[in-house]
Structures are given as structure tokens and as C-alpha cells.
Image (spheres, helix red, strand yellow):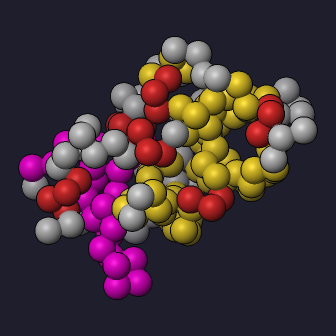
């Protein structure tokens, strides 16, 4: 039996994804986002969250899943990785669950159009669902998102 991981479950398109709770600062409803010029399309801009300016990424855009207009279920998940706080726009944040780390398999090369390097693995849940676990350090890979740096200047 592996270690128990607490995971936030969220939806993008038709798939369910997970991020470890210890990397999530807060989950917010959609709020006004200030555009920042000269950033890649999936960086929507910045938000002012209780006095802290946080860059916001549309995860659908980041993964090439086709962006959609936010709905009343859309959320911004604020994550912290390597001293970087970033908001992810997701279609819905559904649940917090416990996963046994042994239930996480190595990801296939592509899951739902997303390259394996962005994925930590795929967890098999007890009810037969699959949960795609994100590798946040790759999703926020600075060499790929060089322009994120400009948001912090």
C-alpha cells in the first residue's frame, strides 16, 4: 500500500484531472482578469487576489484543448510550485478525494490530446473512473512559458 494522496479533482472538457491538495492554495470563482500584452494566448492575464497579483493560465489553452467561454461552474485554481503562484482556469472543480499513490500508473504518451510530459500519471479510482494527475512543474515549465516572467516585473 502506497501513501495516501489528497487530490483536488477538476474537469477540463470531458476528462477529470487531479492536483495534489498540498500544491493548491485556494479555489476561486471567476473574477475580472486583466490582460497583459505580449503574452502567449493561453496566459489570460493577471488577477489581484487579496493584494497579490497572480498570473492566470487557461489550462484548456495550455493543453491545446480549445478554449471556451467561462461558465458559472468555471473556477480558478491557485497553485504554488517552486515559488511561483499561478491561477489555472478550469471548467469545474468537483471534489477532494484520497488516492493511494500505488494506484497511479505511468501515463501513456498522450491522454486526451495532452502530452505525457505534462502528466504525472493516471490514477484508477475505485468506481472505475480514471483521473489524470498533472505534473505541475512541467505544466509551469518556465522555458516553455518564458513570458510568464514579464508578468512579475
Residue 31: x %, y % from top left: 40, 68
Task: Report which quarter residue 50 is drawn in.
Answer: bottom left
Q: Is residue 143 above or below residue 55?
A: above
In the image: residue 106, left or right of residue 70: right
Report the residue at 34% width, 57% height from top: 56
Tell me if I can see residue 71 in this picture.
Answer: no
Residue that lies at the very extreme toward the front in this rendered image: 2
Q: Is residue 81 above or below residue 15?
A: below
Compare residues 62 and 149 and report the one nearer the observer: 149
In the image: residue 1, left or right of residue 84: right
Report the residue at 55% width, 20% height from top: 111
- Tell me the quarter of the image containing the C terminus: bottom left
Q: Main secondary structure of the magenta part?
A: strand
Residue 94: x %, y % from top left: 69, 52
The part of the chain drawn in magenta is 38-59
Report the residue at 53% width, 32% height from top: 119
Residue 11: in magenta span? no
Compare residues 35 and 82 and report the one nearer the observer: 82
Residue 110: x %, y % from top left: 51, 17
- Tell me the quarter of the image containing the N terminus: top right
Residue that lies at the very extreme toward the left in this rendered image: 38
Q: Is residue 147 above or below residue 78?
A: above
Amino acid at each position: 500500500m502506497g501513501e495516501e494522496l489528497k487530490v483536488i479533482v477538476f474537469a477540463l472538457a470531458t476528462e477529470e484531472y487531479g492536483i495534489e491538495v498540498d500544491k493548491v492554495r485556494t479555489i476561486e470563482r471567476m473574477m475580472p482578469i486583466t490582460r497583459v500584452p505580449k503574452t502567449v494566448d493561453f496566459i489570460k492575464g493577471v488577477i489581484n487576489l487579496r493584494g497579490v497579483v497572480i498570473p492566470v493560465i487557461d489550462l484548456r489553452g495550455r493543453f491545446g484543448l480549445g478554449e471556451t467561454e467561462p461558465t458559472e461552474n468555471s473556477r480558478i485554481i491557485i497553485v504554488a510550485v517552486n515559488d511561483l503562484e499561478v491561477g489555472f482556469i478550469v471548467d469545474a472543480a468537483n471534489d477532494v478525494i484520497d488516492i493511494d499513490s500505488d494506484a497511479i500508473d505511468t501515463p501513456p504518451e498522450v491522454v486526451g490530446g495532452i502530452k505525457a510530459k505534462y502528466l504525472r500519471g493516471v490514477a484508477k479510482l475505485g468506481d472505475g473512473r480514471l483521473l489524470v494527475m498533472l505534473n505541475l512543474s512541467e505544466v509551469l515549465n518556465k522555458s516553455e512559458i518564458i513570458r510568464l516572467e514579464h508578468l512579475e516585473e
